[in-house]
Image: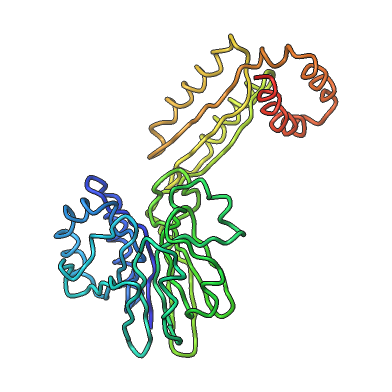
Amino acid sequence: MNLLHTADLHLKKGEEKRTNVLKWLIKKADELNINYFIIAGDLFESNTDATILRSELKKIFDSAHTTFLIIPGNHDTKSLSHDYDYGKNVIQLTKTPFEIIELNGLTICGIPYQNKKFSECVKNIPGEIDILIAHGTLYDSSFIFSMLDDKETEYMPIYPTNLENLARYIAMGHLHSRSIEKDYKKTKVVYPGSPIALDTKCEDKRYFYLINIDKKNLKIERIRIDISPYWLRKELFVFPGNEQEILNEIESHLANLDVTNIMPNIIINGFIGEKDKDFKNKIDEIDKKFTNKFENMKITIDIQTWDRIIQNRMVKNFVQKTMELDNALRIKVFEIAFPIFSDILK
């Protein structure tokens, strides 16, 4: 049996590109002879958007040659129920704490988003689950700590011990930024990431997962969604003396980027002289020069005043002692030290 796994489309009124990605995925599902198309929560941006888009979605689903398995996420908890008709090709898994169905001899379990711990939802699940579909935050120390300030990590906490041997494949939704694959004993857990770059944290190419499964074998493949643009992050550090080098690097970076599905996200940190507004003006000129080249581009400047810091004797001595360092190493040292100096001297 072949399945396609995606999540977090966040369909929204006025955001036609998101709907176009769904149509692309459905076309790809037809090409791959997909039996079941999993949407692991947050099909809609909001319950209001679901109300507006429901009739259009029904037509899209009805035109497909596959069957959709959909659970509610935290954004669309009230958008899916048997009171709503999404057409003959849609199976809604909305019962709480979980709902189990049998498809082609395989056992499928859906866990809709709920305002409780994941462990509470699964404590009475029987064994021998082939595919489990859920929407929540997996707190795995190998990746989650870099995302803890994101709002996307606040919901239905899931811990690795909750997942061990729970099912053969767990189709997750909720974390947008990138695709994640983890193994917990005999359980394969996958977040596909949002198929659309919903914000600048979506810095990698966009993917969906192809699952080939029977009672004995499980094979998965990550496949690129080549119509979805993604953000490409570049961070730079400026200080008095390397302003022109930074300007040249930004311009070269933007000139040499392939425009196909890339959205540059340039972040400039550091220090400049209090009277040196020319640097910011030149950044504005670069922004205007390349704004038509890319579908989206973002340049963020977070620069503090150098003059106040360099007057401090400790900082002057520190700068003097770095003069003999390799320039690249010197920049790295400044990048670490100057924000600390700035905080100390406030």
Is residue 71 or residue 249 the one in the foreground? Answer: 71
Q: Quadrant of the C terminus?
A: top right
Residue 185 location, quadrant: bottom right
Residue at (41%, 81%) from the top-left corner? 125
Q: Is residue 224 left or right of residue 336?
A: left
Q: Vertically, is 122 above or below 79?
A: below
User: Total of numbered circles in the picture?
Assistant: 0
Residue at (83%, 18%) from the top-left corner? 317
Is residue 15 or residue 148 the one in the foreground? Answer: 148
Residue 323 location, quadrant: top right
Residue 177: where, in percent of width, then height? 47, 52
Residue 145: where, in percent of width, then height? 58, 52
Is residue 111 or residue 192 the one in the foreground? Answer: 111
Q: Quadrant of the N terminus?
A: bottom left
- Give the colouring mode of the picture: rainbow
Residue 232: where, in percent of width, then height? 51, 44
Residue 165: where, in percent of width, then height? 53, 80
Residue 161 location, quadrant: bottom right
Is residue 230 or residue 5 the one in the foreground? Answer: 5
